[in-house]
Image (cartoon, rainbow, N blue to C red):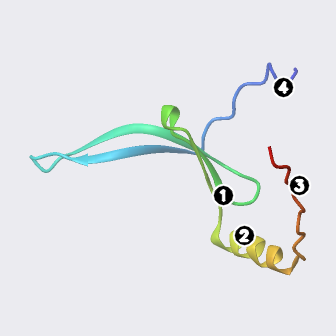
Amino acid sequence: MSSAEQPKKQPSHVLFRVERLEDGQKHWEEVGAAWPTKDGGFTVDLGPMGKLAARPRELLEKMRAERKKEPTQEVAQEFSPK
């Protein structure tokens, strides 16, 4: 079976917008879904509102620390007056 023929993986989470009504009840409206990523985060699909990427704070802090250690490379830009 080719990748195009494989069924889509079901989301692990369903996302809802919860609205409290005047009578105290809550109205739950499904707004999206989320799938876990290999790095412990989630890919969130909000349909027409777009997609989000959620990543663990520890992973982001590690990535930022590694970037600070790397020497910065200055890129020369050419300027040509018109």
Q: Which mark is residue 73?
A: none
Observer-nearest of 78 and 23: 78
Give the CA distance from mark 2 to mark 3: 37 Å
User: Nearer the N terminus, badge 4 or badge 2?
Assistant: 4
User: Nearer the N terminus, badge 3 or badge 1?
Assistant: 1
User: Nearer the N terminus, badge 2 or badge 3?
Assistant: 2
User: Nearer the N terminus, badge 1 or badge 2?
Assistant: 1
Q: Residues within 10 Å of mark 3 (few under 14, many from 20)?
A: few
Give the CA distance from mark 1 to mark 2: 9 Å
Task: Provide the residue designation for mark 1.
Answer: 41
Q: Position of residue 30 (x, y in %)?
A: 40, 37
Give the CA distance from mark 3 to mark 1: 40 Å
Observer-nearest of 29 and 50: 50
Amino acid type indicated by mark 1: Gly
- Specify whether 78 is left or right of 6: right
Task: Provide the residue designation for mark 4.
Answer: 3
Q: Secondary structure at mark 4?
A: loop
Q: Quadrant of the N terminus?
A: top right
Q: Position of residue 59 (x, y in %)?
A: 72, 69
Q: Which mark is residue 59?
A: 2
Q: Residues within 10 Å of mark 1 (few under 14, many from 20)?
A: some
Amino acid type indicated by mark 4: Ser
Q: Residue furthest left?
A: 23
Task: Provide the residue designation for mark 3.
Answer: 78
Question: Do residues under tags 2 and 3 come within 8 Å of each other at their CB atoms?
Answer: no
Q: Secondary structure at mark 2?
A: helix
